[in-house]
Image (tube, grey):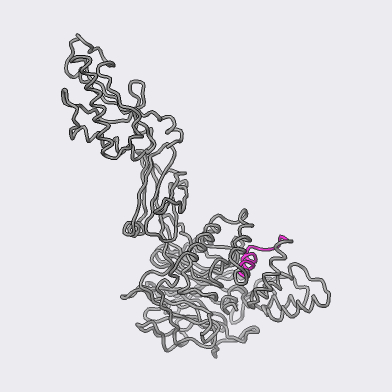
Amino acid sequence: MKSKFFLFLIVLVANSVLGQEMTSKADKYFYSYAYEDAIREYQKQMQEGKLITNYQLLNLADSYFKTGDYVKASKIYLDINKNDTIMSSNRFNQMLQSLSRTSDTERVKALFESKSNVLASELIENVEFNYRLLEEDTDLSSGFFVFSVNGNSEYADFSPSFYNDKLLFSSARKSKSKKTYGSSGESYLDIYVADRKNSGAIANARSFEGIPDSPYHKSTPFYLASSGAIYYILSNTEGKNLAFDEKGKNALAIGMAYDNGFFRFILKDLSTSFYYPYFDEKTERLYFSANFEDSYGGTDLYYVLTNNGQVMSEPINLGPRINTSGNEIAPYLFDNTLYFSSDVFYGLGGMDIYRSKVQRNGSFSIPVNLGKGINTKYDEFGFIISQEEDGFLGYFSSNRPGGRGHDDIYGFKVDEKPGLRTLIFAGEVTASRYDTPTKDVRIELTDVNGELLKETYTNEDGFYQMEIPYTDIVTLSVTKNGYSTFTETYNPKGLSELQKAPLNVNLVAIEDMVRKKEGKTVLELNNFFFATGKTNVTPDIAAELDKVVDAVNKFPKIRLGIETYTDSRGASSSNKRLSQKRAEAIKMYLVQNGVPEKNISYTEGFGEEKIINNCTDGVYCLDFLHKQNLRTLFVVENYENMAQGAN
């Protein structure tokens, strides 16, 4: 069965049918959220041979889904999915959810892949990543110690929020100040406060008096300690009565209150409900859940920019990396990580809690399921966390068996930040001498056996981001045609450091490392000279040869020819032999310092055969003119291919 609060979020109780077309008694029950009654009436309608449309069949499937009969729900969803195009993305998700509870994973994957051509690439990547992570990880507990708190009641208790040394939460428990509504007989939601002990236990739960009273819904509080403001949702009202839009819908608004009694509406629309406010003080963004027209499924996560409590922007959707064909609720930011809940089909069941790291450019990493240590096949939501002296303490809500009410609040303790272990590689790739951000650079991750783990390409801003399940040894390769190659292998210590800061890489364009000389394309180096009649590599010569070693490391496929020349002084034959020995000495140094022999196409000493000035035999020249003929060239034989693409 779905969490009572989750159903409340998706189908807010109102005294209308929200503008839906009703053609039967069954429809009236369905749009009033009396799902068991709707099932009975739809079945009766079919038994009597009355026409039932595909829209009504989907209502019946939804009713089965809401009441936990996933076998019957999936059968109807599948039949309509084959023959009609009216399946929304949210119902497609519910179909896959139903199948995931009643069928094998491979069937779910196959149905999902059948729609891959119309699905967001981010969703496809999220699905593949989380399936792999949950299948491969051998320690799904993630170190969680989960405990039930004593303050739960027989009614729905959920949405915990830190309030100094206390805990705020929402409850449907009965109260003299609250009316009851609908067929549930439960009270309109109210906000409660409880004392919080060092152990994480709570005690002395009582109504919270810190915000204006209302006989209708007040729920999902978030307390901002720096200002004393409390953000929460409340029913739209006119005076003492509920306010409805032109279709008869009553929605939820987000309000903000202070201890001194000041109150203002932050987000209010009679036709749109807002849920689960969270205010990020660093960015002055107010995050929340809602179902607008640009939703990717059911409810999505959004934010608005604010300034001193005033909304300064339209709602901004967090995008397809976070929002899915399912429902996303309950955003919470902690230590540069977004935690939220989603009922997307690839989770463990129902609403699961996920975490996604906020990247340097404001984007999000792949949402990662927190695993079986905290998630179950039931609903988990309303996650909050804080750092304590001995680790991390937090709370969440769940309708798992064993609780006192429909939804209960649970606490947890964990030694490290929660979530299945992953590795995030992110940063910027620049190129050439001016550190220009470079797009379309290929980033590869391989394992200890050289098997490809993942690959991506930098975007227009030179930014890349990849996430993989944790492994001890990873090699990162950065390549682009015509540019140098960066390759580095990381062990556990190096991988740990990489998670703390972006990995920025600067590449070198091959054209920036060469120049034209004597009609050839050669590496650009400073001139160096052997001692007269000598072939030994001195430290000054080694400094320049090390640049050649570096060039080969940057361009592993480069092919070099080593050419050495002498001046005309001395016998021609002696100069020829001397220059050849110098070329071979250079090659030996390069090979000894890591240059593969395959990168050296040839070595040739030309002696005085190619004098570049007039200082030939018998011509008097000053020393500096003779010295112009003493030179070594590193000819790049495959420059054209490298510049055009073959790195």
Question: Is residue 532 or residue 296 the one in the foreground?
Answer: 532
Q: Is residue 93 magenta?
A: yes
**Magenta segment range?**
84-97
Residue 625 visible at all: no
Q: Is residue 630 above or below residue 469?
A: above
* Quarter residue 493 falls in: bottom left
The relative height of residue 11 versus residue 192 in the rendered view (above or below) is above
Q: Quadrant of the C terminus?
A: top left
Secondary structure, magenta segment, majority class: helix
139, 397: nearer the viewer: 139
Image location (x, y in percent) of residue 538: 18, 33
Where is residue 595 shown, x and y percent of the image? 31, 37
Residue 526 visible here: yes
Quarter of the rendering occupied by the N terminus: bottom right
Left/right of residue 451 with respect to residue 85 in the rendered view: left
Residue, x 33% and y 27% (percent of image)?
602
In the displayed structure image, the side of residue 537 where residue 347 appears, left or right: right
Q: Is 156 above or below relative to 353? A: below
Magenta stretch holds residue 398: no
Instruction: Look at 38% across and 66% down and name the residue there.
Output: 335
Residue at 45%, 54% (x, y): give it. Answer: 453
